[in-house]
Structure formats: structure tokens, C-alpha cells
Amino acid sequence: HIKREERGNFGFHLESYTERVRERMELVARLRDAIDNDELILHYQPQMDRERHMVGAEALLRWRFDDRDIPPDRFIPLAEETGLIVPIGLWVLDQVCAQQARWREMGHSLQLSVNVSVRQLQEADFVAQALALVRAHEAEPQDIILEITESQLLHDSVLETVQALKTAGFPLSIDDFGTGQSSLVKLRTLPVSELKIDRAFVKDMAEAEEARKICSTILSLARNLALSVVAEGVETEAQYRFLAAHGCDRFQGWLFSPAVPADQLGTQLPSLTGEP
Ligand code: C2E
Ligand code: MG
Ligand code: MG
Ligand code: MG
């Protein structure tokens, strides 16, 4: 009796496994041409200062084809495993610099944040290429914040590159901070200028005393190390107020705006930045 059920389950798992492998191969094949086929697009999510004025935005990649939206959490890992994140990442940086230049021409100077994978940092010429892209758009490295997740930053293979990026003038931000394993010693030696509180802690703030304590601890740690802090996933006034009261510098989340296409954000810029 039990045996047959087990076999049934096994059959089911095998089928879904095969299905997943096939889908994965299809996505990888498609991702190879995604840039050329104009299937990738960047959305921008505003970051606000303590006075709720927009001072920057994070660029977030979107992949759309045949009326399908593949979420980044699906395709970024594929891009990382296949190395496709290297050309895709350069494309992202180029797009972001170009967009920043357009907004600058409209009179808005915004710091833009770009997500960078460890795989990109392992390329020998990443720093030189990043600098070349920024200069090609007459921007300054200071205006492009590079976000690296805490867990990826702990790879010893990237420490030299991370140091070189800092020397080149790029501000570095530790993304999803609080979910990795940085020791205090490591944190003090890493050349970063910003911590980005993971949205899991912000999310649980209302219900869990624990999450509030983690947030306020990160904020006082950052103050002691003279790092600035941005909170991601801010959805409610209560979250914003708690974070602001504990010294958070910048805020990003649906309370202010989701990630939106550049053109849409462009029309909202005057009201969001509080500038004419
Ligand atoms: P991330 O860098 O931690 O980005 C924050 C994620 O939180 C984004 O998800 C954003 O849309 C989402 N988010 C923002 N505000 C809120 C909120 O108030 N509530 C909730 N529930 N979510 C919010 P998204 O766009 O799906 O991106 C997922 C991840 O994919 C990013 O996490 C980042 O690690 C990666 N990613 C996105 N674009 C790129 C890219 O160009 N390069 C690389 N290497 N990774 C990227
Ligand atoms: Mg990020
Ligand atoms: Mg994050
Ligand atoms: Mg995250």
C-alpha cells in the first residue's frame, strides 16, 4: 500500500524535475539574446531622504517576452551561473549612466544605485570597464552606488576588486544587510560607505520586537562606523517613522513608490524631488 504511494510521489517529482530542467534550459537559451531582442528593461525605484524628498533611485532589472514577466529572483541566478550576468551587468551600468545623464539634463541630479554580482567582480577588467562607462556618459563614479549583497561580499576573491572600486571613487553599499555573516572586524575593514537594511527586518517590524531591535542595532552600528543607512521595503508610515527616529538616512519602498519605468519616473521627478 505505502509502497505504491511512494512510487506515485516519486513519479510526480521526477516529472516536475524534468519540467524544471527543460524550462531552465529554455530560459538560458533565451537569456543569451535578451539584450539583442530588447527584452531587458530597467525600472527605477526612488530613494527618499529624511524629509521625504527623492535623492536617488535603485535600478532594477526586468525581463519580459511573449507577455511573460520573469522575476529577477528567477533569472538573475541563471545569469550568474552561466556567466551571462557579465555582459548583462555592463549593459545595466551603461543604461543607468545614460539615464542619469538624461535626468541631469532635465535638472535633476540623482544618485543611482546598481546591483552588482560577485561574478562580475571576478572579471579582471571590471573596474576599468565600469570607469570607462561612467566617463563615457560624463558622470562621476561618486554618483553611481554599487550594491553588493552581504553574502557575496564575503567572497575573498572579490576583496581586491572591491578595494579598487572604492579607490576609483564608487560608493559601495552592502545590500540585504543583516542576512549575511559579516563579522564586526570584517565590516570595519571593508571599504563600504552604506548599509542597506534587508527588507525582511523592515517587514517584520510591526509584529516582532526582535526585528525592531535588529533595525535599531544596525542603525547604531552604522552611526558608530560612520556609514550611511538606507532601508529597503518600507511600506508603512509606522516603519518610516521608526527608522527615521533611529537615524536612518534614506528610505526605499512602496510607501513612496514601487520600481517604475524611467519615463514614468521622469514625469514624477519634479514632485518627488521637491525641485521645480
Ligand atoms: P534587491 O537589490 O534587494 O532589491 C530590492 C527588491 O525589493 C526589489 O525586488 C524591489 O522591487 C523589492 N521591493 C522594493 N520595495 C518593496 C516594498 O516596499 N515591498 C516589497 N515587498 N518589496 C519591495 P526585485 O525588483 O524583484 O529584485 C529582486 C532582486 O534581484 C534584487 O534584490 C537584486 O538582488 C536582483 N537584481 C535586480 N536587478 C538586478 C541587476 O541589474 N543586477 C543584479 N546583479 N541583480 C539584480
Ligand atoms: Mg539592491
Ligand atoms: Mg536589497
Ligand atoms: Mg533583497
Image: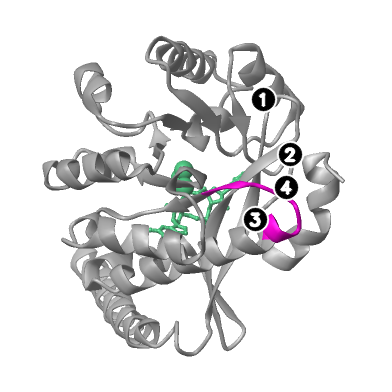
Q: Amino acid at mark 4?
A: Ser
Relative image position of residue 9 (x, y in whole percent): 28, 69
Give the residue displayed 66% in from the left and 64% down from the top.
102
Q: Mark 1 or 4 closer to N-term? A: 1
Q: Which residue is mark 2?
A: 255
Relative image position of residue 195 (x, y in whole percent): 43, 30
Mark 4 and mark 3: span between their CA atoms? 7 Å
Q: Which residue is mark 4?
A: 257
Query: What kind of colouring is applied to the model shown?
Result: one colour
Residues under numbered marks 4 and 3 in contact, where contact means CB atoms less than 8 Å apart: yes
Q: Amino acid at mark 3?
A: Ala
Relative image position of residue 209 (x, y in whole percent): 54, 13
Up-down relation of residue 125 to residue 141 (above or below): below
Q: Which residue is mark 1?
A: 239
Give, as a single range, the part of the protein colored magenta.
103-112
Mark 1 and mark 4: span between their CA atoms? 15 Å
Dot 3 falls on a residue whose secondary structure is loop
Q: Amino acid at mark 2?
A: Leu
